[in-house]
Amino acid sequence: MDMKKLLSLGWITTTIFIVGTFVLGGLLVNYSPISQTISEIGEVGSPLYLQWQIFTMVIGILLMLFAIGIISFSRHNNLSVIPGIFIIFSGLSEFGIALFASPHPLHNVFGLSMTVGYFSALIFVLFWKNKLGITFKRVSLIAFILIILGIFLNLTPAFAPSLYPLEYYGIVQRFLLFTFYLYFAFVSFSTVYTFSNIKKPLCTTKNKY
């Protein structure tokens, strides 16, 4: 698979994830995307347990292929490959989430490990700087701020349960995850556009990372 196709997997994965969560949730009787988490679709005992495992593993595979595309793009343009490595961690976390369905103790462990991937937006800013333009940097910073806000809201039930009604926790979780994946779609479109329109590497100094 060539680099452009691998880079395109960013927005493809985002589309599959968002649409898939709504479709699978809609197939589950009495499931509420407003109050229930995405993991509850495929929890142990759910009629969609197997379908959810397969779906989540596919997302993990696509993320890792997208990461390979980012790493290839980085090397082609003498950029740091570290952002791609962070995306690989996201894919591995999805695998863990799929293999250890809720309420298995390791499900939450792998869920928390997604935090590594959540920092991808900041990592792109720190290691790619302005190589893809100021718009890429600004959007990355905005995405990171929104993701941090999403992490905070997702964790508040543990230390500030009165901050918002738990009947809306499903929306809160989706705010975090959808923002995270939509950022990958943005990275995907940005890198595909750059790859298609710039023949020469973005910088001449070979990256050490």
Image (cartoon, rainbow, N blue to C red):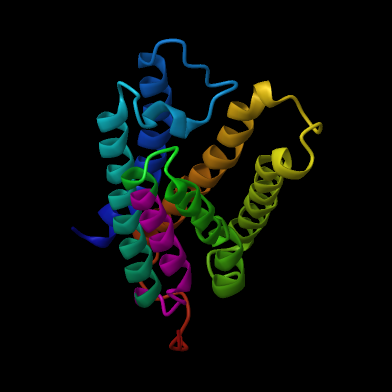
Residue lying at 55% horizontally and 55% vertically, measured from the top left:
118
Q: Is residue 90 magenta?
A: yes
Residue at the limit of the structure toward the left, as seen here: 1
The picture places residue 157, in percent across and down from the top left corner, at 71, 38
Residue lying at 42% horizontally and 62% vertically, measured from the top left:
89
Residue 160, by quadrant, is top right
The picture places residue 1, in percent across and down from the top left corner, at 18, 58
Q: Which residues are magenta?
A: 76-96
Can you say which quadrant of the picture contains the C terminus?
Answer: bottom left
Residue lying at 61% horizontally and 56% vertically, measured from the top left:
140
- Residue sitting nearer the eye, 203 or 120: 120
Above-or-below relation of 27 to 111 = above
Relative to 22, 150 lies left or right: right
- Residue sitting nearer the eye, 76 or 155: 155
- Could you tell me how many numbered marks the image carries? 0
Majority secondary structure in the magenta region: helix
The picture places residue 129, in percent across and down from the top left corner, at 60, 71
Residue 47, by quadrant, is top left
Relative to 146, 79 lies left or right: left
Above-or-below relation of 127 to 88 = below
